[in-house]
Image (spheres, rainbow, N blue to C red):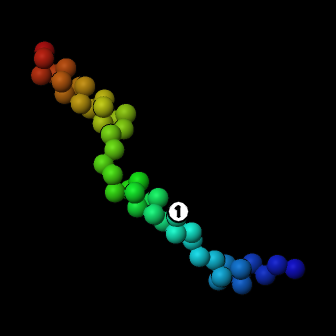
Amino acid sequence: MINFEEELKKFHPSLEIEDAEDAIYNKNLTDIADLMVQLIKEAKTEA
């Protein structure tokens, strides 16, 4: 039978996943909320 506690002690995250997380979190990406805020600001300045 599998001893889950022992298996969890042996677990090490993949380095590839950690590298991907760093690449994703360290980028300043524009999302839809940022775009909407920018559009609203532009609309207010034009009015």
> What residue lies at 24% left-to-right and 25% top-to-bottom?
40
> What residue lies at 41% left-to-right and 54% top-to-bottom?
24
From this view, report whether residue 23 is shown above or below residue 5: above
Q: Quadrant of residue 33?
A: top left
Q: Is residue 34 left or right of residue 22?
A: left
User: In which quadrant of the rendered image does the N terminus lie?
Assistant: bottom right
Q: Quadrant of residue 43?
A: top left
* Mark 1: amino acid: Ile
Q: Which residue is under mark 1?
A: 17
- Residue 4 locus on image (x, y percent): 75, 78
- Residue 39 locus on image (x, y percent): 25, 25
Mark 1 residue element: helix
- Report the residue that reaches farthest toward the right: 1
- Report the residue that reaches farthest toward the top: 47
Q: Is residue 28 left or right of residue 20?
A: left
> What residue lies at 57% left-to-right and 69% top-to-bottom?
14
